[in-house]
Amino acid sequence: MVTVQQLMERLKEGISPLEETVDTAKFGDPSQEVEKVAVTFMPTYHVVKKAIDIGANLLICHEGAFYSHHDSEIKSSAIFKEKEKLIKDSGIVICRLHDYIHRYQPDGIMQGMISALGWSSFVKENFSSYSIFEIPEQTLLQVVQSIKRQLHLKSIRYVGNLSTNISKVGICVGYRGSGTITIPIFTEEDADLVIYGEGPEWETPEFIRDAMAMKRNKAAIILGHLESEEPGMAYLSDYISKIYPCLPVEFLPTENCIKTL
């Protein structure tokens, strides 16, 4: 037997307690025994319904249920009220694991990306905000095609010349695509390519545009926040299954709601 609270504390082991964190129980009674765990990146309305339908009484999510990192819900909204009712009526416990998993060594969300890409043997060094890889030399086009295949993506946004040779790569997951993080990877780590989730479009892409104009071939692949972090939650799902082998655990993927024509 393991309670929700015990399981969540186990997932935070080895990390100094954070004074301020979003990693708390958002709904339900954390003292209840865990019957089945569902793990997801984004607890959308459909994901919550799916978790309830499969009999999970604990849903662990990375991002918040109500459109704000700090869970500042718009409680007057009919959208909020209907979603809250679904959750409360079901009795499911919803817990976030955001701040602590990013403090795993290496970062648990990054580890999920490394595993999904099959790049474990290419890791040169892991830092708190990014990881550096030495991959077999190939063109940017080949890297793009490989990532699309490994992450099961229909399309990828990129900046750069597709014929550029790539061997040194930096990866930043989530909202770490700002120039303050990515540009030093190019200038100090001498990376050919930086892969990131999302960031201001007037920073990293424009740095690369100017670098290319100066005949310095640099490139970026912009995966999207969900696409860069969801593999980390799939990794967490597998990890929970390993430490609690008798506990049913199911990963629930989240389809990106942003479409292209």
Image (cartoon, rainbow, N blue to C red):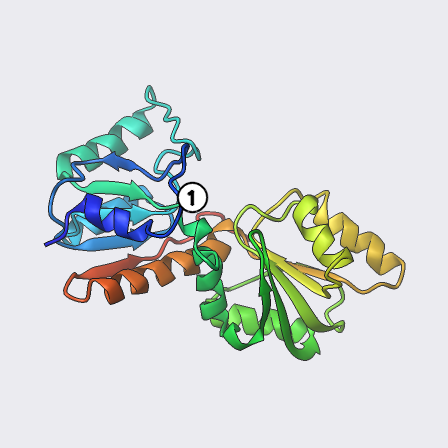
In-front residue for pair 21/238:
21
Q: Is residue 241 above or below residue 87?
A: below
Residue 249 appears anywhere in the view: yes
Q: Is residue 68 above or below residue 168?
A: above
In-front residue for pair 34/154:
34
Q: Quick check: 183 left or right of 30?
A: right
Residue sitting at 71 percent across and 72 percent down? 166
Q: Could you say where residue 113 lies in the image, as x and y percent from the top left?
A: 48, 63
Q: In this view, does 177 lie above or below 240?
A: above
Q: Could you say where residue 54 lies in the image, as x and y percent from the top left?
A: 16, 55
Quarter where residue 104 is shown = bottom left
Residue sitting at 27 percent across and 26 percent down? 81
Read off the residue under disc 1: 99
Residue 227 appears anywhere in the view: no
Looking at the image, which residue sits at the far right? 214
Q: Could you say where residue 10 lies in the image, as x and y percent from the top left?
A: 27, 52
Q: Could you say where residue 26 lies in the image, as x and y percent from the top left?
A: 27, 35
In-front residue for pair 19/160:
19
Residue sitting at 14 percent across and 65 percent down? 246
In-front residue for pair 68/236:
236
Few, some or many C-alpha atoms within 10 Å of disc 1 (few <14, some 14-19, many ≥20)?
some
Q: Quick check: 22 left or right of 49?
A: right
Quadrant into which the N terminus falls: bottom left
Q: Quick check: 97 left or right of 144?
A: left
Residue sitting at 27 percent across and 60 percent down? 240
Q: Quick check: 215 left or right of 4?
A: right
Callout 1, which amino acid? Asp
Numbered disc 1: secondary structure: loop
Looking at the image, which residue sits at the far top? 76
